[in-house]
Image (cartoon, rainbow, N blue to C red):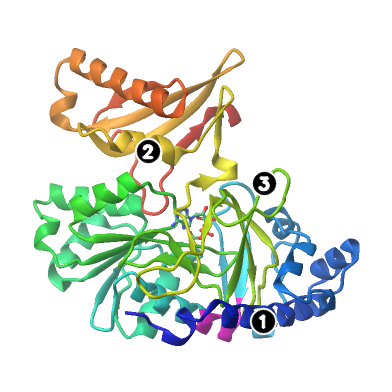
Amino acid sequence: MIYDMEFETLPREALEAIQLRRLQATLDRVYATVPFYRNRFKEAGIMPGDIKSLKDLKLIPFTTKQDLRDNYPFGMFAVPMDNVVRIHASSGTTGQATVVGYTARDINTWAELMARALVAGGASRGDIIHNAYGYGLFTGGLGVHYGAEKLGASVIPVSGGNTKRQIVLMKDFKPTILTSTPSYALHLAEAAEEMGISFHDLNFKFGIFGAEPWSENMRLEIERKLHLTAVDIYGLSEVIGPGVSIECHEAKNGLHIFEDHFIPEIIDPATEEVLPYGQTGELVFTSITKEAFPVIRYRTRDVTSLHPEPCKCGRTMIRMKKVSGRTDDMLIIRGVNVFPSQIESVLMEINEIEPYYQLVLDREGNLDTLTVLVEVGERLFSDEVKRLQELERKIAKNIKEYLGVSADVKLVEPKAIARSEGKAVRVVDKRKI
Ligand code: DLL
């Protein structure tokens, strides 16, 4: 099923005409209302009127997270505060929080996009959605919530945490769709098992998981443990929140970007050159319908590629590959570039381990060291030391073979790695402490 048949299946030519019109209107508006953009345009020697086709987009300078920080909290807003009805902020774990605002129309746009996304992910009016994304400054909870209501589904605003209670509600309310981070989904499965409840006896059909990178192997693990079809949803506060792109449950092969609202580009993060379709680089977005907080060529730091081939679901919107990581959490270990999700992929190939891991980076002398902590089940952990050591060696060998880095693998007891209710902490970098 497709929520917005007209817009989600637009022929490319018609879509591009809409994009250009909306882009030009957005540029005119930010030039008139946001001093930051006006100055940037002036420095680059361009006027909004110089953008005559979508190809001209590349004339415009990029916007970075630092730019948003420099204008903290409301300096990037393109409307007076009178017109702002909602504020969200990113957690700011890598620095000062970024603050974003929405007008009433923005909230409505976002709800429409999330309704589209939920339908692409398998939901329809009759569904009961157990929404375990955090409610609050994080965009996940309220983003899904408004989309679910717009669609006319029944939403349970359970938020993150209180895990045992969530399992009881699942048993009693029989929700059919689960929305949460993929790491919290696994934690829910674990908690259910401890309570003697099997997901096979619950009613879930689809899970719509995102807000953090997760590998294909993690998808298989989740689908097996939670007995549902798992699709990937992507978004970021700066662009709108969840609902920028989503996989369709029909293909589960790349996330359709809602291009009538956001123009994607892929750039080489070092040279800042725009890359052709299919090549991997940093994702850049220009929002073309936002009122309160439009972003122009915003560098997301997320690494992916774009694929224009038609999809069997009928949507014509371009697909982005699953995000493999962020340019700023790429680990450089003795000269080798590795994303945490690549290590995850190797780990998930091994049957004997549990899907909980953490990468610890440290330094010995001048050399970086990587320790991979991975949980094993109770039985295996209390097994002979020799078996554990064998398994540790096998995992280290696989990591070396697939990724070319040496790692010290340590198998740890169940629950040794902290569970997250939102985004999992996959990397502890002691070099920065
Ligand atoms: O995480 C919005 C969201 C909520 C998306 C719920 C999906 C579901 P932020 O907190 O601003 O917004 O974090 C955005 O999270 O730049 C990516 O690095 C990462 N991210 C989000 N979705 C995915 C995904 C929300 N599906 C940052 N795969 C983004 C990989 C993701 N990374």
- Which residue in the protein does label 2 denote? 344
Check disc 3 and give the amino acid type: Pro
State whether residue 99 appears in this view: yes
Quadrant location of the N terminus in the rendered image? bottom left
Graded by Cα atoms within 10 Å as few (under 14), some (14 to 19) or many (20 or more), the crowding at tag 2 reads: many
Check disc 2 and give the amino acid type: Glu
The image shows residue 207 at horizontal and vertical percentages of 28, 63
Query: Judging from the image, what secondary structure is the residue with disc 3 in?
Result: loop
Ligand 1 within 8 angstroms of badge 1 C-beta: no
How far apart are labels 2 and 1 at the CA level?
A: 40 Å
Marks 3, 2: nearer the viewer: 3
Q: Is residue 78 found left or right of 342 in the rendered image?
A: right
The image shows residue 120 at horizontal and vertical percentages of 36, 72
- Which residue in the protein does label 1 denote? 22
How far apart are labels 3 and 2 at the CA level?
A: 24 Å
Is 311 in front, or is 174? 311
